[in-house]
Image: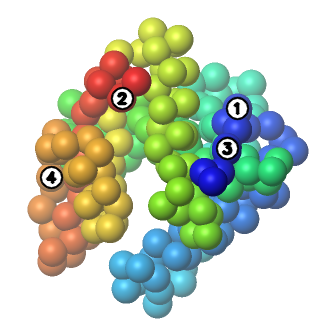
Amino acid sequence: MKKQFSIQLAVPLDLEAADHVFESSISAAFEQEGLEALIDDIQQEIEHKKQLLRASLSDLNPDLFFLTAKHNHNVVGTISYGPCGEEIRKCTNDELRHMGTLGSLYVLPSYQGQGVGSALIRALMIRLKEMEVAQFCLDSGFKIAQTKWLRKFGTPYTVAKDYWGEDGDHMVWLCEVQDFL
């Protein structure tokens, strides 16, 4: 039987559980990429996501929000939408600076491959359509994620060759909301 997930806007009560999602999934992503030795980078990424989530709950950041996926009332995944990030701006020479970004798509390792990420993306697309947002961008420097995004989002808008060092490309996609509803 397929698991059912509820998806909703993140609320302060979700913070601790979402932090656990970041800690588990970001550590696992670095490990899958063979980058587990980059302990400082892993910690910085986790802390950055925790700060973003907290910022999204503040009235000072109306352009940033997180959705959470829950199974049995437990947060098992997150996705965010907010202003264009630094890597996207750098990789596109600021061409997409006014574009909102799909980001922070993280799913607990034990829930990966069960449709949580797809459900989060679909819920985000529904919300973006309600907000009358027609396009969004996303980016990734992780090879495993890039493989998934190539399948889901198609040809990237741009590929920054060797952005993260030799054979460490960074990809940016520009997508139409309507294509993912």
Asked if the residues shown at circle 3 and circle 1 are in contact, with their CB atoms under 8 angstroms apart, the answer is no
Q: Which mark is residue 180?
A: 2
Q: Give the residue pinned by disc 4.
A: 159
Question: Does the residue at mark 3 contact the one at mark 4 (Cβ under 8 Å)?
Answer: no
Say above or below: 59 vs 153: above
| Three-letter code, disc 1 | Leu
Query: Which of the image's four quarters has the C terminus?
Result: top left
Residue that appears at 46% across and 82% down:
31
- Cα distance between the residues tagged 4 and 2: 22 Å
The residue positioned 70% from the left and 33% from the top of the image is: 8
Three-letter amino acid code of the residue under disc 2 = Phe
As helix, strand or loop, the secondary structure at mark 2 comes to helix
**Quick one: label 3 or label 2, which is nearer the N terminus?**
3
Does label 2 or label 1 sit earlier along the sequence? 1
Cα distance between the residues tagged 3 and 2:
19 Å
Q: Residue furthest front?
A: 1
Question: Which numbered disc flags the more N-terminal residue, 1 or 4?
Answer: 1
Q: Badge 1 is on which residue?
A: 9
The kind of residue tagged 4 is Val
Name the residue beneath numbered marker 3: 5
User: Could you tell me residue 37's position as x and y percent?
Assistant: 46, 90
**Secondary structure under the numbered disc 3 in the rendered image:** loop
Q: Looking at the image, do the residues carrying marks 2 and 1 touch, with CB atoms under 8 Å apart? A: no
Q: Nearer the viewer, mark 2 or mark 1?
A: 2
Q: Tell me which amino acid carries mark 3.
A: Phe
Q: Residues within 10 Å of mark 1 (few under 14, many from 20)?
A: some
Question: As drawn, is 57 to the left or to the right of 174?
Answer: right
